[in-house]
Image (spheres, rainbow, N blue to C red):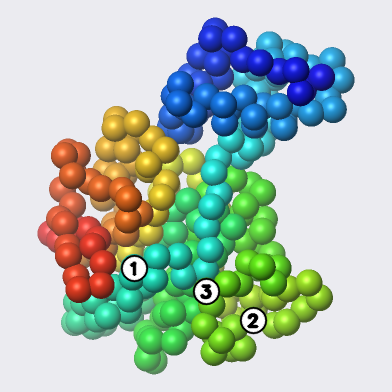
Amino acid sequence: MAAEIVLTDTEFERYRDLIYNESGINFTKTNRSILEGRLKERLRNTTGVTLASYFTSISQNKEELKSFLDSVTTNLTRFFRNQAHFEALERHVIPELMNIKKATGNTTIKIWSAGCSTGEEPYTIAMLLSEILPPPWKFEIVASDISLKCLMTGKEGFYTDTRIEGIPESYLKKYFDKVTGGYKIKTAIMSKIRFDYHNLKNDSGLRNLDIVFCRNVIIYFDEITQAGVVNRFWDSMAGKSFLFIGHSESLFGMDTKFEFVKTQWATLYRKWI
C-alpha cells in the first residue's frame, strides 16, 4: 500500500535526479520528506505499482511524467500577493514603458507570468492594467506553468469564496461574476490571458517581452539552473524591460546582465540596452 512507501537512499537519488533533469526542481536531503509524501499520494490505492515500476513508467511515458512533475510542484499563490510589487508596476514600471514605447508608436505591453500556478498572478496584473492603461494602450499576457492541473484552474477562471481574499471590493464587482460557490472572472479579462504549458528549463520561444513576472519559482532551483532560467528570460525580453522575482529571491552573485532597480515601493530588475 502507498502508506508503507519509504524511499531508500538509492530510490530517492533516482527520483531526485529524474525530477532535476526534467524540470530543474532540486530536492535535497532536507526536503526529501516532501518527495516521499508526494509519491505516497501519487501511488495511493494503486494496486501492484511499486516505486521501481512507477519509476519505469514515468521514464518511458511522457504524459505520466508530466502528471508526476505536476504532483511534486508547490503551488502557493493568491491575488495581489506582495502588494508592493503591484505598486511598483503601477507607479514605476508602466510609466517608464509608456514613455519609451510611445516614441515608437507601439502601444501594446507584452507580459509573461512564468510559474503562474492557478492564475491569480496574471489575473491580478490584467485587472490592474485594465484600470490604469488609457486608450489606445493595450496589453497581452502569457501565463505559463509546469502544472497542467493549475493551468486548467487558471483557464476556468473560477475561485471559491476562500480564494478571493486580497481583491479590492471595487475590482471584485467590476471584474468578477458571483456564481454558486465562489466567483468567476469576467470574459473580458480572461480574453487578455493565454495560459500555456511551459517547463522553465527550456526556451519559451517568447520574444520582445516588456515585463516578466517569475516570483517564488527559482528558489526551488539550484544555482546552475537558476542562472539558465534567468538568462533565458533575458533572451525573451525587449531591450528596455523589467523582471519581477520573489521578495526572498535575488540575482546577487549570479552571472547575469540584469540591473538591480530599487524603487520606493519594491525592488526589481531591468534589462536596459
Density class for disc 1 (Cα within 10 Å; few <14, some 14-19, many ≥20) is: many
* Residue 192 in view here: no
* Quarter where residue 222 is shown: top left
Check disc 2 and report the residue beneath it. Answer: 176
Q: Quadrant of the N terminus?
A: top right
Residue drawn at the location 57% of the way across and 26% of the way down:
33
- Mark 3 / mark 1, whichever is N-terminal: 1
Q: Position of residue 56 (x, y in %)?
A: 67, 14
- Mark 2 / mark 1, whichever is N-terminal: 1
Question: Quick check: marks 3 and 1 in contact, CB under 8 Å?
Answer: no
- Mark 3 / mark 2, whichever is N-terminal: 3
Check disc 3 and report the residue beneath it. Answer: 166
Which marked residue is nearer to the observer: mark 3 or mark 2?
3
Q: Quadrant of the C terminus?
A: bottom left
Question: Quick check: marks 3 and 2 in contact, CB under 8 Å?
Answer: no
Is 133 on the left-hand or right-hand side of 40? left
Q: Which mark is residue 85?
A: 1
